[in-house]
Amino acid sequence: MGLSKSKSATPQVKLLVSPASARIPWPLLSWLALGGGVAFVVAVLLSGARLIVDPYSPNWLKTAFPGLVNSFEAAPQTADEIQAEMRSQGITAGQPIAWPQADRPQAWFYPILKNDGRSIEELWVYRVQGDRRQRVEQVAIRPLKESFITTPLVGTASQVASVDSNATLASVKLMPATNGPWLLLEGQRRYGNTVMRYGQILSYQPRTQRIHRLLNWSSPAGQPPQWQTGSEQLLIDQTVGLRPSFLLYQLIPNDPPQLQEVSLYRSVYGADLGTSLYEKALKLAQGAVWSHSLQMMQSAKAELGADWSAAAQTQLDLIGLHAERTKAQTEQTWSSQQQHILTYLIDGQWGKALAILEDKPEIYDSTLQRLARDFDALWRAVTIHLQVHPEDVTTQVWGALLVTARQSPEAGEDWLTKKTGSKTTLERLQAVGRSPLELASGDTVDGSDGSDAVGETADGTSASASALPATTNAGRYLSLVGQARAMTAPDGGWLRSQTLPTLVPGQTWYHIDVQLLQDSSGWGLPPTVTAANFWANSLSLRRQLQLFSGNYPVAGLAVHGVKTTNSGLALLAIGPEVEAPVLVATGHSLQWLSTMPWQTAPISPVVGTPAEGNNPATSVEIANDAVTGPISSMANTIGAQLSLTPGQMAQLYPYLQHASLDLTGDPTAEQLFHLGANLPPELAISPGKTIIFSGNGELLYSDVGQPQSLLALTPKSAERPATLLIEQADRYTLMGL
């Protein structure tokens, strides 16, 4: 049988190919895992070692494993043992505080005091274990910066110079809270006439046995933080003067709890739900137009209905707190119409404020002076209100009056003309401050009719009078300083208005001798000009004149005439009766010593041994070793100027006031020292004297032992340094530094 031959099979090779992928670096990951584990173990060991050395310092192990670290903490002690231990270590503690209540305490807080025995340095926390107490926490109490404490005073008449020193806390007590009482730490400091209360709010969490800082606070109103009735809102009162200012915080339940500030500068609605009313209400609140903002926000709440949110309600609550205060102020009885007007302006009741001023033209000048003092806040309120209601006539008039107070009547009219084309509104502005007689006759204080006349004086006698020239611009003269003396009636020779007003009780005529004048070139003696020329170039100046008594502004003056005299220029004016010679000046032209930011002098002299070979009066030992250099030199100079021994200087120190001001424009500020009132009689020193040094300790000015006194400073400009206004025998002169 034959064999059949077949074709041999062809060998085949199959390749299995997988898609390319990133290769996992297993060796690298292993090393990283190993390294991470080693690092964790090292961190645990280091934290554990730190916990053993200092069991009360912040440590993540105490939070992560609260039960694990108990063995590292102090052994439980009785209250007597705790006190004995503190005494043995020289530690002074305040009265311990039981938490949450004295009859069933879960923890005790011991305030640990500094060496002065008043300031709190630490807070030690003890948990209760039967009749014993075990220390579980030790918290350092950091002082607050004075720059933070005085922040509410910025932009107010009580503003103080910027400081960065520390302010300690002196007391601690429990403060009610929904999740257990909090700790309220407090301190107090005086800045001028304002007593600031400040402090911290702490929270204690019994689960973790930790203390948490929630909030730093300060209050120029002297009020601690307070919970709003029936709510979880914490209020801090930062009101200064008549202008309310509140901070409102909403409690956010958490562990630890949080306090979230309510902001009026952020909408809580998106573009889809935000309404015009809501946005306008926020805008008005940002301008501090509180009552109108409240009304508009309440309307927005009704408009939004079910979409009204809790966050919007907190904004409404904050606006309501301000509006309640400002409205209450308008309903009080005030000693002056100017104050009443200001309360209406602060509340945004522009119409009622204007009605008072229109009804009382005699307070026009004094009201302008008050507007100038409160210009910034009022201007912001007016401009924001006009953004929301651009056609509001009374607000437009107040805007023009603010410009008038800051610049001139012409500037006020120009501003109003640009704001509105209404002739009626402009005429209403022009009528403010004019009496019914002036309005009926068409006469103004400037006597723009240009006629000559013979008028009657206040006592019924006749006096020759020439008509005042028309005044159309603010004029070149900016400020003046003069001496005023009262008269029973105007004498002859005045260039004045045809019809002089009749005095009301409490008013008198004043003859004002102009002694110094300021124009764009600076201060100097009155120039040789005609009375008519001076009148035509002094409109803005005449509108701003004030009487000063004892360096304090008393009231405004209404100028009705001018004449040249042998000594220069004189003005005829009406003002309130003031005893003794009085100074006349523009309110903004001078910085009076009485209004300077005086603080306690930075020199603390103590009784010491004078330098060898020196008179005891020429050497003052400085208590603080850190106070050296120029300050030490100033102290020696002051002692020599006053002829005081070091011991007497130490006695004088509480009455020595200090201010640091840039008067010359050089890199270092000048140092002013002033002797206050009520000096110890045994020192035999006249009060009211001033000594000025350069920054490096060089004596620039002293009126100690001189028949003169420094009254005020002219403002420093970029071109020229400040000058000193000196009084001597009821005359005034300027002195450069």
Image: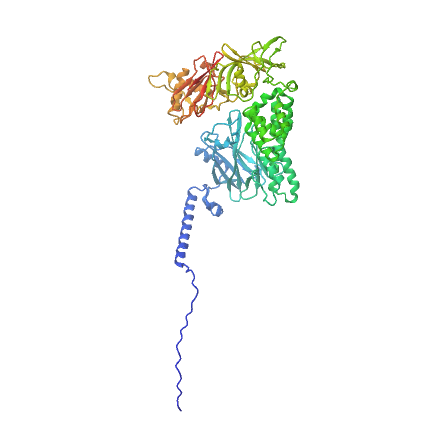
Q: Residue at x 47, y 38 (%)?
A: 139
Instruction: Write down the quadrant of residue 286 in the picture.
Output: top right
- Judge by depth and name the residue closer to the eye, 10 or 158: 10
- Judge by depth and name the residue closer to the eye, 493 or 27: 493
- Judge by depth and name the residue closer to the eye, 471 or 501: 471
Q: Residue at x 47, y 39 (%)?
A: 138
Q: Residue at x 44, y 34 (%)?
A: 88
The x, y position of residue 643, in whole percent, is 40, 15
The x, y position of residue 121, in whole percent, is 47, 34
Q: Is residue 345 above or below residue 276?
A: above
The x, y position of residue 678, in whole percent, is 49, 17
- Is residue 548 in sight in this rendering? no
- Judge by depth and name the residue closer to the eye, 686 or 664: 664
- Is residue 683 in sight in this rendering? yes
Instruction: Write down the quadrant of residue 602 in the picture.
Output: top left
The x, y position of residue 167, in whole percent, is 48, 31
